[in-house]
Amino acid sequence: MMSLSKYLVQCLCVVSFLSLLPNLTLSQSREEKVLNDKLRFEKSGLWYYNDLEQGFEVAKKLNQPVLVVLRCIPCEECVKLDDDIMEANPRLQQLLKSFARVRIVGTNGLDLSLFEFDTDQSFAVFVFGPDRTLYGRYGTRSDRKAWEDDVSVEGLVASLEGALRIHREYPANREQLVGKQPKPPTFATPEQIPSLAAKYGNKLDYQGNVVKSCIHCHMIGDAMRDYYRSEQGRLPDQWLYPYPHPKTLGLILDPNQSILVKQVIEGTPAALAGFQVGDQIATFQDQAILSIADVQWVLNSASNDGAIIPVKVNRNQATVSITLKLDAAWKTREDIAWRSSSWPLRQRGLGGMVVKPATDEERASLGIPADKMALVVQHVGNFAPHDRAKKAGMLKGDIVLAYDARTDLMRETDLLAYSINSVPVGKTVELRIRRGNEEKTLQIATAK
């Protein structure tokens, strides 16, 4: 099937050519894009725009599930499943008629007792029953720009069809939905989080600067990490390694089928548990599963000290039980470096530099063993507060050989995690680096 990225590009090219999407033209400002999006969708009459309560009212009257799309309007960096793309697919267009559809373009005032999700996503879908029971989630990625390995229009269709099945069976299936409900939030809405409280209100300011008034999804995560670091001096695993991807466990799901096992990596927890290619995941931790995002919801809550997760899959017209065993520190194998939330972590722990592992060729040329740390500096921030590495003398191309006397931090993720959770705030850390044929020692202090 056509990948989502190629499909998106073709659709956008055609629609832009027909001038049906003025908010996507490059000549317009971010402000104009947001205002035009509001105007267009309100005129369409197909979506309740920034009005969740109206969506639930209609859902109750028609006994329909509520489909909520949380979408960052100015963001065009990542591939996303936007409503225009949805409606370009006839099957999905017909399917949407079975839902009360709500479009939310800012998280100001968002009820966090209903919406708990991976805040590094710029596009997320939620399906609720009329009584506000969450049926499931859709939307993920494991790369800053590429989405096609994780989501697709076809995959969204499959997930929404699954949501309709859950709705038809509700409330007889209530037990399979209990674990999917959000936990009581620390703060009721995003603008109540301390670092956001003085800057944002509970609504978008369409009469003023609407872009600057918006609380983006990633800002919720950043603000909560600020809160925990300030209160506890470290980040809980759920905020340092949020929403682990199934591929970390060796489980690759088909983006076009959502919960169909596409590949199982040999020697991984998924392989040891007995997953097989072609398995259709029915339940995960006794929860009905609609998509990879639902699987990540379960993994997000699983303990990093080890966990046992019961799974049921449909295999060859039979239901098979699987036990997925997670060892201690399994979350540390997750890659967090791609996330937008890694940038504040780099500022605090690494002084604003970006690194990546040296290649085998680079290691060989420098005589660095494969089991020793060798992280090549890709970028050094030029402006405060991301310029502390630069002020310390760090240059692009330097190779970090040791950080705080640790030589076993092999990935940028490992370095970020150690600098945030194992180094006291404000401590001056010594870095041993390789620059050409010379070794040097630099010092960088961690920040709040």
Image: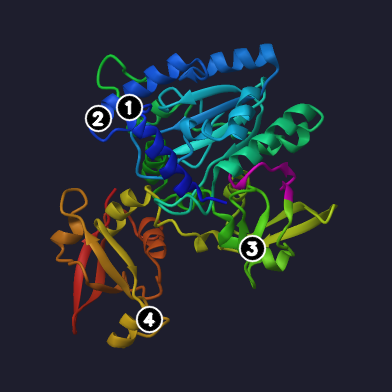
- Residue at point 69% right, 43% down? 289
Q: Nearer the viewer, residue 428 or 143?
A: 143
Residue at the disc numbered 1: 22
Q: Amino acid at mark 2?
A: Gln
Mark 2–mark 1 contact, CB under 8 Å?
Answer: yes
Residue at the disc numbered 2: 28
Could you say whether the residue bearing mark 2 is in a helix, strand or loop? loop
Could you say whether the residue bearing mark 1 is in a helix, strand or loop? helix
Circle nearer the N terminus (4, 3)? 3
Q: Separation of disc 1 and disc 4 at Cα? A: 48 Å
Res. 155 image quadrant: top right
Residue 161 image point, x, y percent: 68, 35
| Label 1 neighbour load within 10 Å: few <14, some 14-19, many 20+ | some
Q: Separation of disc 2 and disc 1 at Cα? A: 8 Å
Q: Separation of disc 2 and disc 4 at Cα? A: 45 Å
The span picked out in magenta is 281-293
Residue 435 image point, x, y percent: 19, 77
Q: Nearer the viewer, residue 330 or 232?
A: 330
| Label 2 neighbour load within 10 Å: few <14, some 14-19, many 20+ | few
